[in-house]
Amino acid sequence: MESSSIFRLAFILSIVIFLLTHSWFHLYKTSLFLSSKTNFPPTFKTRKTKFDSVLETPIFKVKNTFNSSPSYPLDPLTIQEINKAQIIISSYKPFLGSFPSIRSLSLDEPEKIQILNWKYGDPLPPRRAFVIAWANSQVHLLIVDLNLGQVISHVQNPGSGYPPISIDDVRVAIRATLSNEEFNKSIVARGVNFSDLVCTTPSSGWFGPEEEGKRIMKVRCYSSQGTPSFYMRPIEGLIVTVDIDKGEVIKILDTSPKIPIPNGENTDYRYMSQDKPPEMKPLNPISIEQPKGPSFTIENGHNVKWANWDFHLKADQRAGIIISRARIRDSETGEPRSVMYKGFASELFVPYMDIDENWYFRSYMDAGEFGLGATAMSLVPLNDCPRYSYFMNGLFVTADGKPFVQPNIICVFERYAGHISWRHSDLPIHGFEERIRESRPKVTLVARMAASVGNYDYIFDWEFQTDGLIRVTVGLSGMLMVKGTLQNSTNEDDIFGPLVSENVIGVAHDHFITFHLDMDIDGPINSFVKVDLVKEENPSAKTPRKSYWKAKRKVIEKEKDAQIKLKLYEPSEFHFINPLRKSRIGNPTGYKIVPKGNAASLLDLDDPPQIRSAFTNNQVWVTPYNKSEQWAGGLLVYQSKGEDTLAVWSNRNREIKEKDIVLWYTLGFHHVPCQEDFPVMPTVTSSFDLKPLNFFERNPILRARPNFDKDLPVCRSTDLN
């Protein structure tokens, strides 16, 4: 066979494998379905496995609302609205010659004041689409008025950085790589069959003037021989840099041809492939049943009502999951009271701690470069989400402007894990004739999404509790990004992470998730209060105590004073209060953020990845509300220089006292891998709480009903041996 035919075959096989394994496969697959309205090609079909019986378990069925008219101002664009936007753009004069590549097309949300004043029964504010497009080597930001049927705003090249990469960009990069003679010689020299070759496209970051004026993409390849977990078999020391606008390879780095490709032994993580008995005694299935069905309702596909909460929930191509207009009913008056206007994961920064030529650039910005919603796969019933979960679809847009539905990427469910909501017991010795034992079970409501960004899986939980607390949890699972090595024993002086298997280094890295939390405590006018817990010396000789601590409150007036690093031995509390509304005893109503386990970036502030991700310089920020300031890493992140980040906005040092203000919180993980993370890592989690602070007059669930034996069916095992 001629060499050109071999390369053609290799290219086709690599694309197929890429689409089957890469986190964007679902985007491509769905676009095929929408465009052809036929079954998928046989290439994409998978054989039935013993795991499929789980997938066929009935779930909480709901109707698809994307063909319906929007009923709420924050509802995502419908299929009809997306199709209309595409028609308007295609007839727009600057694009008459060729349709641009659409990188984002979503609802351009109305002004906040319009949302706050809107009531059911009122006409909806004008429906508009915000579009990020790429055409003629330029960025185009469009606002399309769907009511007027025209483009009402068009901005070109608003700053440094490019839109998220698309599947078309990936195709270009891989095609250029597989067509390159030097690259193919390197693959042959390493003994890799082209039929086993899998190439992925890690983002390139930004590292100086050499990268100016062109969009570049790095290409890294693996061998899939003998394993579905190709990430565990890297072809180390071979990196290709491609100019994706020209479709040309501009650099090949081939530094380590003697490093062996790790073998695929014990890397197949699929249940159907496990041919050995379990490594522990199997657990009997556990299911929390709801004999009367779930206690929550979801109206019009997006408005969630549960217990004393109601909020708007939707999927977003970039943020993944967005919570809006979260309100809780007052336990005394029944009044619905505002807690949070909008909350979502704004950016996710993942820098790797390897300065090798083949690794230094790996510093991902997953939300802005790839999209947390765009990489969200369908959740697995009974495993990702319990029985009776409500599953919500995402409606996104392909590069040609067509809508596609990604099914079941959000689930909503009630959780009871045996936790206690509140309790107290008193012994008879205190004067009571009978022993008092009062306890209440804790049942919560969870909205969950999981994004599979390449090798890593990120699980986002927004958990609402009956006492007014909101807990946000991020779980990390999936696969390590590993490095091939000649070593088979640990040498601390030579590697950038520990060995996790033979010839495999688990490279140390960080994960930082920055959340945008537009808190509106009883309305938009709020203040930020820093409460320092300060040690004091005992000035009195009357008692033997030598020290104590006291809380010193300070209302922060400017942004820079709200740039806060968490300190274990200089503790503080961080309150959002409404100075215009007081409790019956005079305390301003509020919420506080309660950090849990966290980590801070250790990179130099002038290190290029840290410049781009300067929003991780602090764990807490507070800024004035600005509709254009939602993305902590900037609107355009790919190859950005850090000129449009949360850190840049905050350094303007604007007034934040008694203003409409936004809380930003960064949750961090340091990850030094270990053998237990191989080949798939058990989930590790961290979280933070948004907790009521003088918001209620007393415990809001004091009158909560306890459970009684008659409420639930009793199931007992006859054999506990």
Image: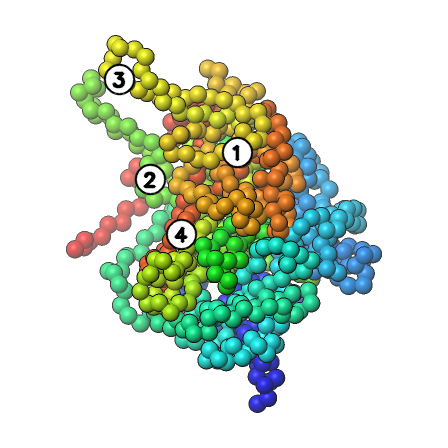
| 478 sits left or right of 716 in the view | right
Q: Which residue is labeled 2 in the image?
A: 419
The CA distance from mark 1 to mark 4 is 25 Å
Q: Earlier in the sequence, mark 4 or mark 3?
A: 3
Q: Residue furthest bottom?
A: 1
The CA distance from mark 4 to mark 3 is 42 Å
The CA distance from mark 1 to mark 2 is 35 Å
CB atoms of marks 2 and 4 within 8 Å: no
The kind of residue on which mark 3 rests is Arg
In this figure, which colouring scheme has been used for the structure?
Answer: rainbow
Q: Which numbered circle lies on residue 671?
A: 4
CB atoms of marks 3 and 2 within 8 Å: no
> Between residues 651 and 462, which one lies in front from this camera angle?
651
Residue occupying image coordinates x 47% and y 21%: 553
Q: Earlier in the sequence, mark 3 or mark 1?
A: 3
The CA distance from mark 2 to mark 4 is 29 Å
Q: Position of residue 92 (x, y in %)?
A: 80, 55
Q: Position of residue 660 (x, y in %)?
A: 61, 29
| 40 sits left or right of 130 in the view | left
Image: 192 above or below 515: below
Q: Quadrant of residue 50?
A: bottom left
Q: Quadrant of the C terminus?
A: bottom left
Q: Which numbered circle lies on residue 545?
A: 3
Crowdedness near tag 2: few (<14), some (14–19) or many (≥20) residues, C-alpha within 10 Å: few
* Label 3: element kind: loop
Q: Earlier in the sequence, mark 1 or mark 4?
A: 1
